[in-house]
Amino acid sequence: MSFKLSKTSKHLLLSGLLVSVGLWAMPGTAQVKDAKLNAFVEALRQAAPPQRPNDGMYSDWQVLPGIIPDWTKRCIGKSLTPAQFDAGADAARRTVSCIAGRELNKQMKATGNETAAVRSAACWWMTGQYNGCKSGATATYVQKVVSAYQQQSSGTSTR
């Protein structure tokens, strides 16, 4: 069976193929790069309130226990208890990276500004809201995250 395309059909087919390949190969315009995500995750860790015995928070990122089973199920494929999350530094970091990356990407798309995105995502991390961290302890926390992020991003951080 012979199949022959007209000149117009060939042009449309080629144009469609080029557009498809171009869209597939084009990176997301607001995707956070790994280095930026790592800097944000580390900034969240550095800004976290100091761990205190029986403070009800888990891991270096001071995560509330109620969200840990859902986040770990989404991010590492299995639901962990708060104690397992606290004991598993790798699982905690991967989970925090997953959730923090999701939020930082959302804020990069929403704001188009890296510092504003870090500020909003840090506010969300602390309060569950993207706004409202302009005074008090939440403002102090967000500023710590922004400062640590800037240090991490510039490569001048010391761990």
Image: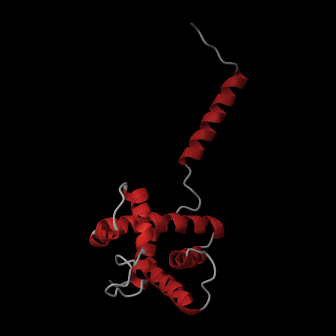
The front one of 20 and 95 is 95
Residue 156 visible: no
Residue 118 visible: yes
Q: Is residue 48 above or below residue 4?
A: below
Q: How many marks?
A: 0
The front one of 92 and 79 is 79
The front one of 40 and 139 is 139
Q: Is residue 141 above or below residue 91?
A: below
Q: Residue at x 53, y 84 (%)?
A: 142
Where the C terminus falls, by quadrant? bottom left
Q: Could you tell me residue 15's position as x and y percent?
A: 66, 35
Q: How is the image coloured?
A: secondary structure
Q: Is residue 32 left or right of residue 62?
A: right
Q: Could you tell me residue 88's position as x and y percent?
A: 28, 68
Where the N terminus falls, by quadrant? top right
Q: Residue at x 58, y 62 (%)?
A: 30
Q: Residue furthest left?
A: 87
Q: Quadrant of residue 16?
A: top right
Q: Could you tell me residue 49's position as x and y percent?
A: 41, 86
Q: Could you tell me residue 39's position as x and y percent?
A: 43, 74
Q: Residue at x 46, y 70 (%)?
A: 36
Q: Quadrant of residue 106?
A: bottom right
Q: Residue furthest right?
A: 8
Q: Residue furthest top?
A: 1
